[in-house]
Amino acid sequence: MKLDILAIGAHPDDVELSCSGTIAKEINNGKKIGILDLTKGELGTRGTPEIRDQEAKNAASILGVQVRENLGFRDGFFINNEEHQLAIIKIIRKYQPEIVLCNAIADRHIDHGKGSKLTSDSCFLSGLRKIETIYNGKSQEPWRPKHVYHYIQWATIEPDFVVDISGYMDKKMESVMAYSSQFYDATSEAPSTPISSKNFKDSIQYRAADLGRLIGVAYAEGYTVERYVAVDSIFNLI
């Protein structure tokens, strides 16, 4: 199955929190999209890997993505080396995405910055013919995504471009709240974390609203780039 977009996150819920509005919009536009989680989030204070796995499946169903996989890297301890790069390269070559969305270039959680660089490096290496990979007993052809974009997470990073997600904010929030073990629930007796507060839940919406305000729409999601974004005509700019 060839994908238009592969969204990659260090943990289950990274993608939903950061770029699920864009995903929902592009699925509505007929694009084929998949999600790849690098870890099972097993070091998370709340929930368990089993619970988070089911929550990830629920979120994928809400968004309507074509496929979701998890590489099972060690939460907190994966590194940017050949072993981990080759695992991601196999997935990139399997689905041949035109665009890869990945973790913020730097963030509060150490896995986000690590995941960002690991994914970016893997996208480049995936295009090299002399790197040979086997998947399901068959040799894979090289494939390099045309674009790698980094979504914004906990830290406030100035975006290089933003995507209007007006009309998809409810779907974004529904996918986020599929992770009921992780986010705000006034009745929960689980330990408090920085992302389990009501303030954090509210911030998902007001941060998207603020980006939207800056471009004259209701809601938006921001991205940083590794190279200039080009347009065919200045009339394509909104």
Image (spheres, rainbow, N blue to C red):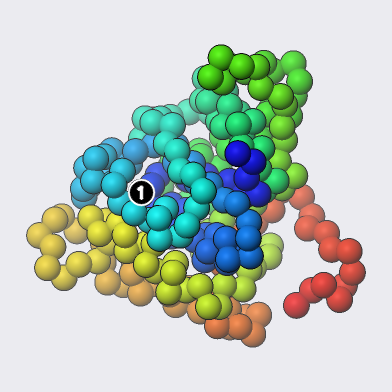
Name the foreground residue: 144 vs 2.
Answer: 2
x 53%, y 25%: residue: 87
Question: Taking the image as drawn, is residue 80 in sight?
Answer: yes
Identify which amino acid the numbered label 1 is placed on.
Lys
User: Eyeballing the image, is 16 above or below 146?
Assistant: below
Q: How many marks do you count on the picture?
A: 1
Residue 237 spot, x, y in % from top left = 79, 74
Q: In the rendered view, would you say 5 is above or below 153?
A: above
Label 1, residues with CA under 10 Å away: few <14, some 14-19, many ≥20: some
Residue, x 10% and y 60% (percent of image)? 189
Q: Residue at x 40, y 60 (%)?
A: 62
- Which residue is disc 1 drawn over? 57
Picture coordinates of residue 58, whole percent (x, y): 34, 54
User: Left of 51 or right of it: where is 77?
Assistant: right
Closer-to-camera residue (223/63): 63
Secondary element type, mark 1: helix
